[in-house]
Image (spheres, helix red, strand yellow):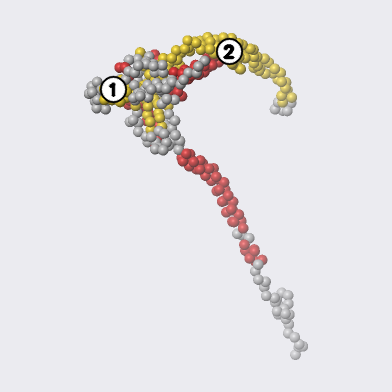
Amino acid sequence: MTPRCPVRLSRTPVHLECETCGASLRVDADQRTAVCPYCASPSIVERPPSHDRPAPHFVLGFSMTQESAQGAVKAWLGKRSFFVQSGVKAGTVDAIRGVYTPAYLYSAMAQTRYAAEIGENYQETEIYTTTDDKGNTVTRTRVVTRTEHRHLEGEHATYVMDVLVVASRSVQNAELEAVEPFDLRTMRRYTPAVISGWIAEEPTMSQEQCYGLARREALEKIGRDLAAFMPGDSHRGLVHETRLDRETLELLYVPLWVLAIRHDPRKPPLRVLINGQTGAIHGKAPLSWVKIALVVLLVLLLLAAPFVLAAARDRGAGRGAARPAAPAAARTNAAPAPAPPEGARPGGSRPGPTGGAR
């Protein structure tokens, strides 16, 4: 089988003329819409469909206004923790923009073979010996729950639908999953009038890449469904193999409010995505390692403070106990008293006169 060459999407910009004022507009290859800077008239580029840029099938409209999105982002920023960089909370939300982001809606038939060990619980009474409060050995009974496992295998058929994967390199598929779900009941057929006046991006990922993302999500969904489908009280060792047939991939535009906050000129901006229908918000606010280091240092100081104070009190108590012994030491080290004169009696009496009586 001859390997397929990778598809390179066209990067050639398109020049079109504004239908209102006649100005010449340049539209990048990744954009589908443009707004005239002279008269604010919206324009839409209708490129011929190709293998990796098919014509859009459906579109989901915005139901959340720009003012509501700005208020939601302000509340979200206000709830960020103390450790978030200060420039994030001080960022302005005026630059928020509504973008129709390309995505693919995937569906397929799934045939799955599975095998697992199914656990069935049962209860029985067992006799055991123990020691009572008085130290005597006693025999008692108790009811215990045990599990018996048996092997089960079979086939499971289902229709996988409503798997949504992003078709833009500007947005990660995990970011789109974070703000899902979208209300697909409001999906309508694509017409240029729906996206007129909005920013709309062309698909920048190939269909093969999007098929890979969609199949991975579909298999994960099948695994979760099979785990819930298993009978019994519990199961273990679930393995399954799935074959996907009748796959379809339809291009869909989903509404996103996008805000980029430039908090540090040396780092990439913080990007916040808001579901244009439900208002679900996703963003990863960068942390300030300076704040984290200061808090850790403060905690260490608070933990060490009682030990430092106790050591200081012990040193002070030791010095106070040594002071009363100082006079005794002084007496011990004092100079000895002068010796009494020769001939002096014990007790200090003066010697009697010498010589005979007169």
| Picture residue at 54% right of the left edge, 16% below the top | 223
Please identify, in this view, whether the residue under mark 1 or under mark 2 is nearer the observer.
1
- Front one among 299 and 34: 34
Q: Is residue 325 above or below residue 39?
A: below
What residue did someone put label 1 on? 16
Q: Distance between the residues labelled 1 and 2?
A: 56 Å
Q: Among all residues in the image, which is located at the extreme right?
A: 356
Circle count: 2
Image quadrant in which the C terminus is located? bottom right
Question: Alpha-carbon neighbours of circle 2 within 10 Å: few (<14), some, or many (≥20)?
Answer: some
How far across and how far down the image is residue 32, in percent? 34, 21
> At 58% from the left edge and 49% from the top edge, which residue is drawn?
311
The x and y percentages for residue 197 are 30, 22
Q: Is residue 29 or residue 224 the one in the foreground?
A: 29
- Marks 1 & 2, CB-CB < 8 Å contact: no
* Residue denoted by label 2: 114
Looking at the picture, how far across and down is residue 247, in whole percent? 47, 12
At horizontal 67% and vertical 71% (from top left) the residue drawn is 336
Q: What residue type is labelled 2?
A: Tyr
Q: Which amino acid does label 1 sit on?
A: Leu
Secondary structure category for the residue under label 1: strand
**In-image side of 35 versus 144 (left or right):** left
Q: Nearer the viewer, residue 153 or 335?
A: 153
For the view shown, which residue lies furthest in the bottom direction? 358
In the depicted view, which residue is nearer to us: 300 or 283?
283
Q: Residue furthest left?
A: 21
Quarter location, residue 260: top left
Residue 347 location (% of width, % of height): 71, 74
